[in-house]
Image (cartoon, grey):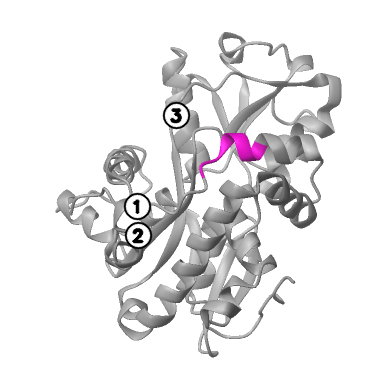
Amino acid sequence: MLLATGSGSAAAAGLSVALAEGPVSLVFYVAQANGYFDSEGVAVTTRSCSSGRDCYRLMADGSVQLATAAELVATINSFTRPDLAFIASISSSANQIKVVARRSAGVSAPASLAGKRIGTVVGSSAEYFLDSWLLFHNLSARNQTIVPLTPDKMVRALQQGDIDAAAIWEPVATNALVALGADGVLLPAPRVYTQHFGLLTTRAMLDAQQADLLKLLQALLRAERWIAEQPVKAQQVLMARLGLSQAVAEAHLREHDFRIRMDQSLSNTMDSQARWAVREGHVPPRSKPEDLLSVTEPALLRKLAPNAVTIVR
């Protein structure tokens, strides 16, 4: 049975988590549905949010103790919040962010996107992906009209013709394709960026509630194993939680790696993102770039699953 969504303060008993709605959060959905948090002895309440950035804001203002977010959220906010700790990836995917376009705008292939209006969430992993995607296809963001939009505005902007294409994460990308129907086209996405979606908290929380955090991670590791052993049932959990068709749920399971990890690739990605964020003016120049590594904290996961940690600190 699903746990009720909590709406109280972060000071409540147990752990409170801002949970991004999407396939990236499947291990949480499974842990809730199967009662793993309860059986591990930790009370977990969740608050839904539409993006990792929104989840982070809930944590930053003290509404919750942890946030689920892409690693870029940790990278950018570490410039002003050195107390942040990214404690585990809960999913990773090179297909979580997609480029959806309108055929009626004359877009049928990456090259035909030149000079078009592209909507994305500026300062997010979607913009970082788009920058890499354009570069791969010998296009430049400088030659496009980048239209800043929030995720909830993306589908409507495409339908109304306010933008010609959108670079956005799931499930918004699939929702856009469904809404556009025959006018929609999914542009090819080479593996230019693998998103690490994970758990973000503070150093103070690590010190104060280490025991509960270990129980939470243990519940998520159980969910990881269940997804691997019961993929059809995992699809059903995703369908019920997000209102997806079976075909879409199957696609999400193929496109995501739901292992709880702390890979070296996470650190490498964050280093690249820090340079990108400075270049694009999203953050001020960092005086000590090497400090970025301190944002990743693999110690808790290493206690439970040493083989899941390959990151070097």
Relative image position of residue 83 (x, y in whole percent) = 29, 70
Q: Amino acid at mark 2?
A: Ala
* Structural crowding at the residue carrying mark 3, measured as other residues with C-alpha within 10 Å and reported as few (<14), some (14–19) or many (≥20): some
* Structural crowding at the residue carrying mark 2, measured as other residues with C-alpha within 10 Å and reported as few (<14), some (14–19) or many (≥20): some
Question: Mark 1 or 3, which is nearer the eye?
Answer: 1
Q: Residue at 69% x, 29% y: name it.
A: 163
Q: Is residue 256 magenta?
A: yes
As drawn, the label of residue 305 is 2
Q: Nearer the viewer, residue 116 or 188?
A: 188
Q: Nearer the viewer, residue 198 or 305?
A: 305
Q: CA distance from mark 1 to mark 3?
A: 30 Å
Image quarter where the C terminus lies is bottom left
Q: CA distance from mark 2 to mark 1?
A: 5 Å
Q: Helix, strand, or loop for circle 2?
A: loop
Q: Is residue 250 above or below residue 189?
A: below
Proximity of marks 2 and 1: CB atoms separated by less than 8 Å:
yes
As drawn, the label of residue 308 is 1
Question: Mark 3 or 2, which is nearer the eye?
Answer: 2
Q: Amino acid at mark 3?
A: Asp
* Structural crowding at the residue carrying mark 1, measured as other residues with C-alpha within 10 Å and reported as few (<14), some (14–19) or many (≥20): some
Relative image position of residue 223 (x, y in whole percent) = 56, 59
Q: Earlier in the sequence, mark 1 or mark 3?
A: 3
Q: Which residue is mark 3?
A: 131
Proximity of marks 1 and 3: CB atoms separated by less than 8 Å:
no
Q: Nearer the viewer, residue 174 or 312?
A: 312
* In the image: residue 310, left or right of residue 163: left
Q: Earlier in the sequence, mark 3 or mark 2?
A: 3
Relative image position of residue 65 (x, y in whole percent) = 47, 76
Q: Residue at 43% x, 26% y: name it.
A: 192
- The stretch in magenta equals 252-257
Q: Is residue 72 magenta?
A: no
